[in-house]
Amino acid sequence: MKALYPGSFDPITNGHVDVIKRISKLFGEVIIAVLLNQDKEEYIPVKDRLELIKKSVEGIKNISVESFSGLTVEYAKSRGANIIVRGLRAPSDFEYELEMSQINYFLSSGLDTVFIMTNPKYSFIRSSRVKEVVSLGGDVRELVPNPVYKYLQGMALRK
Ligand code: PNS
């Protein structure tokens, strides 16, 4: 089975990497698909996000890292993916994810989404919190992969 793991990954966190490690064992192939979202202000340019993801998942087999725009289900179809994967950190994620999986199922006439429960070690980590902590001068070393940590440090120095 070929799985599509879509998201903003702005930036990729240790929680994402944990999900990627686990799904790489469950599926024959995993495409990490980074959304090019014109409506959402980006923190890290997509080109750099792709590089950071590639560095963060180095050594994990069956993974490719790509960007896409438009509907996730259309991209999944174009890449021959037969399942979408999303991580669930907490019950508060559920409502949004349920709705998204249902619209995706409807739009694609039957593409299923499977959910991976985040390792409790990482369940409080979300990209928006990482950005907030960084912008206020806090330490995110334990929250993100090392290449992302270094990149964020570089960003802080350039400001
Ligand atoms: O990591 P995120 O920001 O929670 O990821 C959300 C993402 C990219 C998976 C979602 O916004 C998405 O699939 N966007 C593409 C447009 C789309 O297909 N929307 C759902 C049907 S309207």
Image: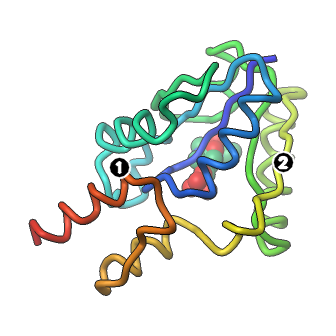
The residue at 75%/65% (across/down) is: 89
Residue 60 lies left or right of residue 144; in this view the side is right
Kind of residue at disc 2:
Phe
Closer to the observer: label 1 or label 2? 1
Percent x, y of residue 1: 82, 17
Q: Earlier in the sequence, mark 1 or mark 2?
A: 2
Provide the residue designation for mark 2: 115
Percent x, y of residue 141: 41, 68
Q: Give the numbered dot on residue 30.
A: none
> Is 117 situated above or below 59?
below
> Is 44 situated above or below 121?
above
Q: Quadrant of the C terminus?
A: bottom left
Choose top left, top right, bottom left or bottom right for residue 54: top left
Is there CB contact under 8 Å for labels 1 and 2?
no
Residue 75 lies left or right of residue 144; in this view the side is right
Task: Tell me the crowding category of disc 2: few under 14, some 14 to 19, or many 20 or more residues within 10 angstroms, Cα based.
Answer: some
The residue at 73%/26% (across/down) is: 3
In what element is the residue under mark 2?
Answer: strand
Kind of residue at disc 1:
Pro
Provide the residue designation for mark 1: 147
The residue at 30%/37% (across/down) is: 47
Residue 141 lies left or right of residue 28; in this view the side is left
Rounded to the nearest angstrom, the CA distance separating label 1 from label 2 is 26 Å
In-front residue for pair 113/25: 25
